[in-house]
Amino acid sequence: MPNHLIKTLIQELPLYAEEEGDFSSVNRNRLISAICDRHAVEPSIAENTVMLCERLLDTLSVLNADYLAKGEWCFISFPAQLMATSVLTAMSDADSRYFSSKFWNTQGIDDVKKERQRDVLRYIEEARRENHTSQQAQPIRYCYVAWSIIKLNGRILFYQREDTKKHFDKSAGDYGLIGGRTNQTDVAGIAGTAALLTELQSPHSPVIKNALPETLKRELREEAGLLFKTHYTFKLWRSLQPYRQVQGAAPNHALTEYYLDIFTIELTLDGFLHLEQRVNSDSRLAWLSLADIEQGETTDHKIPYIKALYDEFAGDRAALVAELSALADSFVPGYFSDKEKYGIILPIDNEKPVAAGVLGKEKPLDLALTTRQLELILGLAAHLRGFEFASHEKNIVLHPHGWIEVSEHSPIRAELVELATFLNGSGLVMENRRDRLFRLSMRPETVFFADELFAFSVKSDDLNSV
């Protein structure tokens, strides 16, 4: 659109008084004629110029709708006139900019500049959504998202969002399910950058939706260090209805339509142990109880960002929690010896036998243990039962469910390997995973000590044997 045509239009604009409310109006045809007369252009060009500017000004809500319906331009107020004049003047001036030439650059900028971009986009997009006459504003951003549900002991794992603007910002939430949006690296089978970006930025793309499992794998690796197959497998739990919100990561803020698939995670033993240590060392990871999810906030003010999931259940958070409660835990201990009403009685003195059998009817096992073997077994049993150790060898890591991890530098590694081989086929079941992870593989409540005072001695003695 030639600048000189808009300059002529500015000269013909109606006026509004700064005080007293006096104003004038201008007929649309008069504006078209003024452009044609001054610049000898085709009427169609003048009309297109006027109609395009009219549409822009109407979008800004500066023109009086009643006058406009009659083909008249009339401003709502003097500030509206200023707004219209500012925009048209900027359009007609090749040197005019509302932002610096680098304002929208996102490479290597700090958080302050990102927030400025976000604030501008958020204001504009919220206004566009709120003021849409039919309340059906169309999204301009499309986001395909994979979320994971890692559930252990009635809690679900969340990850602190990298784009959290303010802690405790309830409108945004600050903790999301582990996962994220699909990017170019997740998608296969599309040749050319333009074609790939077109799919990523289009609604209802089956190609991108089919890439969500790859997105899930990448996000679990980036946010929790979990590797597919080595640490976990997954299944699709639920595909949510498309969800719209003015939201986005960092400055990528707009009315967005989200397509979300949620996957349940089944951890391997290695995955479970890795995750336990990762959560303990990474403050961005947090367990939220089902009660926290129903409440929408933890006691220490962590706020889950799962509005799409709340909306999927029509705001019935109790129904959502019931569905989550029904999901199996992501890891089950799976003891080899899982008999009911069965018990193992361990002696403190190796001159006495290990007894096993139906509770109350235990019988001695044909198992001749050395003093050292019994020490190791008692240490494993104590950890299985959840007793605390005053100290233990530095090359040993104690994990839940009775597991101990022994490094290759530990002097007792060979002893444990030998013990597992010795106990094979006996009533005392011991697991050995890759000569690194060991445990007595039986339910903790089935393991008893012949001397009840042993529980107290474990807390006070230095058990460097384990």
Image: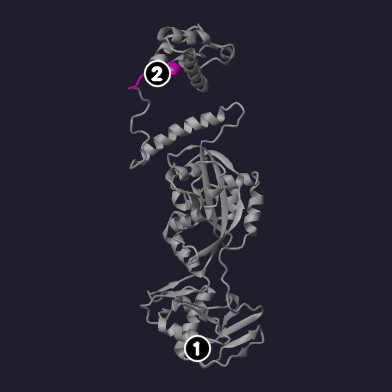
**In magenta segment, residue 219:** no
Q: From which residue to which does the magenta span run?
A: 83-94
Disc 1/disc 2 C-alpha distance (Å): 91 Å
Please identify the quadrant where the C terminus is shown.
bottom left
Above or below, comparing residue 426 to residue 221 in the picture = below
Specify few, some or many for label 1: CA neighbours under 10 Å numbering under 14, 14-19, or 20 or more: some
* Position in image of residue 371 (x %, y %): 46, 90
Q: Residues within 10 Å of mark 2 (few under 14, many from 20)?
A: few
Residue at the spot x=33%, y=31% of the render? 101
| Quadrant of res 154 | bottom right
Residue 126 position (above or below residue 2): below
- As displayed, is residue 100 above or below residue 187? above
Dot 1 and dot 2 residues touching (CB under 8 Å): no
Badge 1 element: helix
Identify the residue position indicated by label 2 in the image: 2
Q: Earlier in the sequence, mark 1 or mark 2?
A: 2
**Residue at image point 52% right, 32% down:** 126
Colour convention? one colour
Position of residue 326 measured from the top left corner of the image (x, y, whole percent) = 65, 59
Q: Position of residue 61 (x, y in %)?
A: 52, 20
Circle 2: residue type: Pro
